[in-house]
Amino acid sequence: MRKYYEAYDERYKAVHKKNLRWMGYESSPIVTEIIQKYGISKENAFLEIGCGEGRDSIVLLENGYNLLATDVSPEAVSYCKAQYKGYEERFSVLDAVKGKLDKKFDYIYSVAVIHMLVEDKDRQAFYAFIKEHLTENGVALICTMGDGETERKTDIRVAFDLGERVCEGEKVLVAETSCRIVTNQTFEKELKDADLEIMEQGLTSVENQFPFMMYAVVKGTKQ
């Protein structure tokens, strides 16, 4: 039985069937800002959790970064492989809630993914995955939808129900999916409870896509 957050795969299928793109092409500036700020090199091992249609991953790949881009949606990964010829082996299906990789990474980033996890146990598993897959000196960037003051969540029982959305100016019936917005205080508590050390925290945005996103740069605490 599929988990509620896997409804995003159905959303991508519906949009791509009409030769549309769900998200825009604008990359997330903070991804490269953190790379530069923390002196992460192209030779370091990079992991993206939730690559979607590749708006952030293709920027790094075309600039020579050693990136593995992943998503829980097989449709999203297939789309990226078809769109970005020459980088097919850099895209892979991964469920960061239930899955595991056999290597660690110096830089893990995830933009607008944790908000799709509604249940506490799934959010905790997501943070645990990040901690487990960071190298000793590795850092992770986690961005989640929200202005830091609002708290709300959707009903996961209707995640696969269809609703009308506008995509690239066209109305499309897509899966409702799931969303949980938390306050800055809740976000901070979740990270600390997961034994992740917060190096910095604040608000960011992605033009034409996410006007408000909370972010945190973390590293795993030593046991």
Image (cartoon, rainbow, N blue to C red):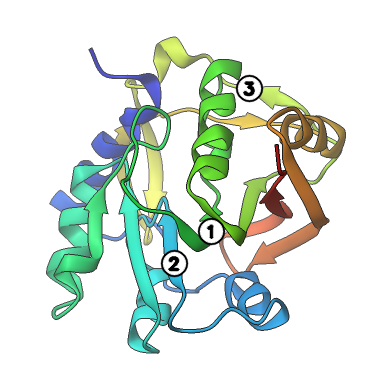
Query: Between tags 2 and 3, which lies in front?
Result: 2
The three-letter amino acid code for the residue at tag 2 is: Phe
194 shown above or below 222: above
For label 1, the residue is 109
Q: According to the image, label 3 marks what residue?
A: 153
Quadrant holding the C terminus: top right
The secondary element bearing badge 1 is classed as strand
Percent position of residue 39, x then y = 65, 82
Q: What residue did someone put label 2 on?
A: 46
Q: Quadrant of residue 28?
A: bottom right
**Residue under the image location 61 percent in, 18 percent down:** 120
Q: Which tag, 3 or 1, sits closer to the chain's start?
A: 1
Q: Quarter of the image containing the N terminus?
A: top left
> Is residue 148 in sight in this rendering?
yes
Give the structural element (helix, strand or loop) at label 3: strand
Distance, label 2 to label 3, CA atoms, is: 30 Å
Q: In what element is the residue under mark 2?
A: strand
Q: Is residue 118 above or below residue 188?
A: above
